Amino acid sequence: MSMLAASKKYKVSYGTLYNKMNGKHFNVHGAPPTFSTEDEIRLLQSVMKCGRWGFPMTLTDLRYVAKAYLDRKGICVAKFSNNLPGPDWARSIIKRHKNLVTQRIATSISKCRAEVSPTIITEYFDNLQGVLVDIPPQNIFNYDESNLQDDPGKKKLIFARGTKYPERVQNHSKTATSIMICGSASGTLLPPYIIYKANDIWQSWTENGPKGFPCCDQPCCARGSRYNRTPHGWIDGLTFQDWFFLSFLPHAKRLPGKKVLIGDNLSSHIQQEVIIECEKNQISFVCLPKNSTHLTQPLDVGFFRPLKQAWRCTLDKWKSQNTRIKAIPKASFPNILKIALETMDNYGDKNSVSKNLVSAFRATGIYPLCREQVLSKLPNDNENNSEILNDTLTDYLKSQRYGNSDENAKKRRKKLYVPPGTSITTALIGLENILEDDGNVEDAVLTLTSDHESDHIVDEEDDLPEYTEPSDENIAIGSFVLVKVQSGKRKSTNFVYAAIIQDKLNNGYRVNGLKAIDTTRQSFKIVENDLFTVDLQDIIALLNTPKIETSGNRVRYKFSHSIDIKEA
């Protein structure tokens, strides 16, 4: 069709068609922009810089940055009220440069996580490189603890248009059950280790759990998942030893050559019996840098999210079939977890459990070994700031993200210091000389401070109670303990109190009860004449010595952590 025919048919000026066909339209449609293209790119590069350092801007922030730029240049734009660009301008500049910037929903990370710097990661990989020499992927393991909540979460459902309060009737609770997960860089998942919050464990709680595919189905894992319980519901030193010796070690012994076990630098995980057994079986016990699990922990990076998605989907179906049950019975938990793992594995092209593990180790740069996988996720302070942003703003962003030396000073040491990426040995933790002297492992004393921090149980800023297993040897007069007391007409109600050991008796201990005086359950006072006798089996835990504070004639004991009490 000729231009003249097209002009007559579509009623478009012949001159317009001629100019368009001959490339004579150079200007962008609409009113000319307030800023030049170079100025807009410079503004957006500043915004992108802030985003890379963990302080992203909103559209409102972008408008005020543009206003400051105009004011500094002495430019007054009549169409901007008070020289402040409007929301339409902010949306338009994002649209014009959609190849550079976009709007995303941000996930918040704590300040201590943001302080993980490229220097820390580089040191970690320098150490890890020597440990992983000639280690095949099936011999590289990562373990981590997480929890599964009794809440299917939110999902989109269909309601009548205009419904003001869309609600769904479904029971849920705030309870959660801890699990220990361990997987290899080759994609092998060991059966989960389940930890209940209870004083005793029942046979029905250990039935119909994960066993065989998609977990390891070799003879070493033939029994499937293992189960344990603690008063607080998360892993401690004893349960970690139980997991290591009964779940991990049988699988590791089946593999030839050296093995590497990577995990958190928590004192509950660094047990002298575990370290000694690792050396006997050619297992290198490697710790990750502190506060870096969101970058360096394979299970955190690429496994727990799809697992919890499958868990919520499975739990939603289970609750739809069991509408009258308020919370998950412990007897039903193992089977729901088993179905969740099968659901996760059947996603997409099947074998998703194995593929997620392989991808997780690759994303954290462990296998294949590649530090750039992690370093690329951190802000780069070596950019050409003359083109992007001035040095003052760069220094400000660095101080906001990493803080200064005074802020980072450790006021209370909680973790055994081990260079991240190196293997822990008896020589490193001071056991070698002790063992050479008498060869008695039980007499060797490993100086560790209790540390129950978990990325999945609580926030990293929160400290969890530091408990010690009670025994006749470590309980002395003046010790602070957590005791269980049965009350009620039929002794059917269990209460948990904090108390002080007043005297050792032939058949138990005489204690004086304490009462919490604040909602944090950290500060306690002595209850006068509240003396009673307890057996060793009624003492749940030995508490760390609290700080004594006095005010006039009043004395109170302040613990460094919230205590798990249940007072009448």
Image (spheres, rainbow, N blue to C red):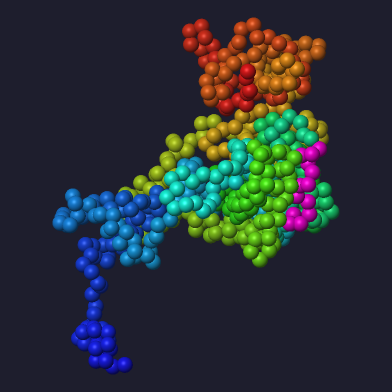
Find residue 71 and report its horizontal and vertical position in percent.
19, 52
**Residue sticking out furthest to the right:** 219
Q: Which quadrant of the figure has residue 80?
A: bottom left
Give the left or right position of residue 474, taking residue 524 as reference. right
Stretch in magenta: 203-215
Left or right: 521, with 329 as reference point: left
Is residue 10 in view from this perspective?
yes
Front residue of 19 and 472: 19
Can residue 142 be seen here? The reply is no
Residue at x 24% of width, y 84% of height:
11
Seen as rendered, the residue at the extreme front is 160
Considering depth in this image, is 56 or 172 the residue closer to the camera?
172
Instruction: Judge whether residue 210 is colored magenta.
Output: yes
Quadrant (top left, top right, bottom left, bottom right) of the N terminus: bottom left
Q: Is residue 520 above or below residue 113?
A: above
**Is 207 left, or right, of 313 in this rendering?**
right
Q: For the point 73% across and 35% down, which residue is it?
A: 229
Main SS type for the magenta part? Answer: loop
* Left or right of residue 4, residue 471 in this image: right
Residue at figure coordinates x 71%, y 43% from the top left: 333
Residue at the spot 74% in from the left edge and 54% down from the top edge: 215
Rendered position, 255 above or below 417: below
Residue 373, how many percent across, how many down?
A: 55, 59
* On-image quarter of the C terminus: top right
Q: Position of residue 280 (x, y in %)?
A: 79, 46
Q: Is residue 494 magenta?
A: no
**Residue 537 or residue 185, whichever sits in front:** 537
Q: Position of residue 15 (x, y in %)?
A: 20, 86
